[in-house]
Amino acid sequence: MPIFRERCSIPLAAVALLLGVALFQQLRALPDPLWALAFLLLPVLAWRHRRLVPVLIAVAGFLWAWACAALILSAQLPAAAEGQDLVAEGMIVSLPSLEERRAQFEFQVARLNQDEAPLPNPGRILLNWYYPPAGLQVGDTWRLQVRLKRPHGLSNPGSFDYEAWLFRHHLRATGYVRDSDANRLLTSRWQDEPVNRIRQSLTEGIAAALAHHDYAGIIQALAIGERPGISAEQWQVWTATGTNHLVAISGLHVGMVAGMAFFLVRALWARVPRLALRWPAPKAGAVAGVLAATAYAALAGFSVPTQRTVIMIIVVMSSLIAGRNNRPGHTLALALILILLWDPLAVMEAGFWLSFAAVALIFYGMRERLATKGLWWKWGREHVLIAVGLAPLLLILFQRVSIVSPLANVIAIPWVTFVVVPLTLIGTLLLPLADSVGTFFLVMAEGALGWLWPFLAALAHSDFAQWVQAAPPLWTYLPALLGTAWLLAPAGLPGRWVGGVLLAPMVLASPARPLPGEAWFTLLDVGQGLSAVVQTADHALVFDTGPANSARFDAGSAVIVPFLHNYGIRRVDTLIVSHGDMDHRGGAPAVLQQMDVQRLLTSVPDKIRREHGAVESCEAGQSWEWDAVRFEILYPFHDQDYRGNDASCVLRVQTAGETVLLPGDIEKRSEKALLEEKPERLAADILVAPHHGSNTSSTEEFLHAVRPGYALFPVGYRNRYGFPKQPVVERYRAEGAALFDSAQDGAITFRLGPSRPVAPPDTYRRQAHRYWDSP
């Protein structure tokens, strides 16, 4: 059958539109607007050559994504306004997320002034308010004194792309509210944000009803779509078992509500002859399904997953109302087209690809399958199908696959969907009408979740819960796609083992590693803190673990472990925590919990807790060799009683030709001690600046002894300390060092070997830059 007829088929048009939109998101910078003029020639070519119609659709997708991106980027905070006291007037447009001493919310700016002078409006911004006044409500209009900065996030291989998330949510600046008499509530009217006011009221009611209950945060997520109340440990269980799609108001839950409304209204409508004669009951049920899905999505704040689901439900129900019996593939393709037209940035989210892939797998793999014998296979096969089919995509996106996902989902999906969610919705809806009755149902929902939780936790903590591997190379993507299609094809296709062979490269491909005698050194971007990784042919060392800024963020979970997994590192042979400051040891608990750590060295053994294995004190003279690379602790000395920064472990890493020096946070006194005791061991090609480039370190004498070719500053973007200090920077320049800093360059990687001089580093921010990223 020819691919093209007189006009482009809907599935082909959907694929073409998707390719155009997805291609645009790979650009490093916005194109010159003049290129748009060249695209105007394509409709003429497509009119003359019908085979070019898919190309025209792809170009239309590219242009549509371009227009939407340009519109978002046009709202920009002036660079000169960063870090300055500004006065912003606007409205709180998201539910304030409340922690112990902080509220976080999105703020739609109406006016922005600096010293009474108007500034360009950045639009929607993300604000933190420390020790906020009681009673913050969505829809309130405030005048606030704020300090803002342009979107900026940590930049490391394998880590969450915060800048992409901010762009995806149209947030063009972040900042905090200053303690000032200028802060004033201007108006507070429920009609300015009526739906969100209802959501906030319900959120507060659920929190009060389930105070001191373990799973209150999960119930809030199921009812309102707000997830701040879910603890890091609970998230880990959901993720490890592959059931995290159940946590928020997902497509499954919206679809369930739509289905219940459809069948209920259809049955009731059919019982009234006058109504049934005027309009068929299935069509009335379809309208009810759309309305119920939309209402539930509104309860979730029209989050991106619920938007996708509502659009898909509208497509399905519209076909029913119109009396058309569309094939599943056409229905899915039409939904894809509408979602891309509604929101071309949806392709930036992993959930977009996973949701469409899951539905496509069900349509593809459930047709004419092998004989279905027994309830278990009829119910369980879909979960096995999705688990196998999504495995390559999960490896690409997250470098991990839940092995226990089919078993977890076959139990958790029906329990959560048909027990926990209905109880949650009934309790939530009754809460404003009859508080005690609503509380009763919410407590039942929380209890039902509690019955499920031990099962999920046992699976999550099992040794075989997840398969973790390095990010697969690009060349394995196409064989994996073909292999998945072959494995899951309808019955009758011979040689299914060929699919497994095609999948094998993605699973078995090993990441590149240093050769014996080489070392790869990476200074990670952990914000205002320090963490570095040294990898040899068969070993890995982590030096410091960055900060823990809150109960919800630490550099260990957010940066270090994803980085190690991204490069296929499953064991940390030595972890060094240089000293006790939280910006150096904050991520240690996560690294110890999530990685196999063989040895732990630190100058503060009393501050590092470890369930298994010893905690050793670092001390000058300790040394070892891995794969012809030498590691040596230069400091602290056994007979010195220094504390704090001056007790930092100092590590020297040396290949046959090149050397790295990691001095932690040592200050002038420790630098002087090193100059007196070990001056001959200080020379290094690469120096991580002591104490982040503060005025208390990097003396002229110390730098002259080290003579670094490269100086690296581990600092946070616009950090409050002003690191690195300008006089210190000038001292490094006087020594002729090339300067890099983690805030501007992201993760900085050197590949060290026997040759000299040291080759320039790879900087991840430059390597992975996209058009929405900061310069």
Image: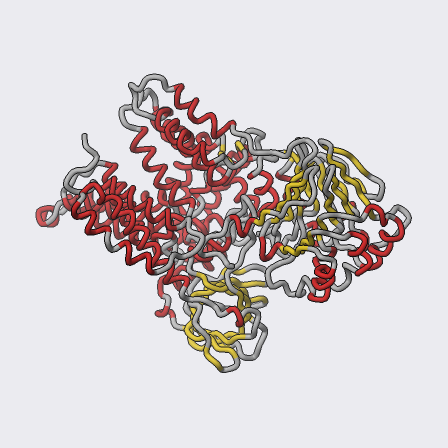
In the displayed structure image, the side of residue 50 where residue 83 appears, left or right: right
Seen as rendered, the residue at the extreme front is 756
Query: Residue 406 location in percent, x, y?
Result: 44, 30
State which quadrant residue 189 falls in.
Answer: bottom left
Could you tell me if residue 604 is visible in this image?
A: no
Please, is residue 665 above or below residue 181 in the view? Answer: above
Q: 449 or 725: which is nearer to us?
A: 725
Residue 581: tell me if it is visible.
yes
Residue at 58% x, 49% y: name it: 763
Q: Quadrant of the N terminus?
A: top left
Q: How is the image coloured?
A: secondary structure
Q: Is residue 482 left or right of residue 183?
A: left
Vertical placement of residue 501 versus 437, above or below:
above
The picture places residue 2, in percent across and down from the top left corner, at 19, 32
Residue positioned 56% across, 33% down in the render: 511
Q: Image check: 547 left or right of 469?
A: right
User: Which residue is the extreme one toward the top?
Assistant: 494
Where does the image place residue 388, in percent across and percent down from the top left? Answer: 42, 29
Question: In terms of depth relative to the viewer, which is nearer, 14 or 124?
Answer: 14
**Residue occupying image coordinates x 47% and y 40%:** 397
Question: Looking at the picture, does residue 755 appear above or below residue 747?
Answer: above
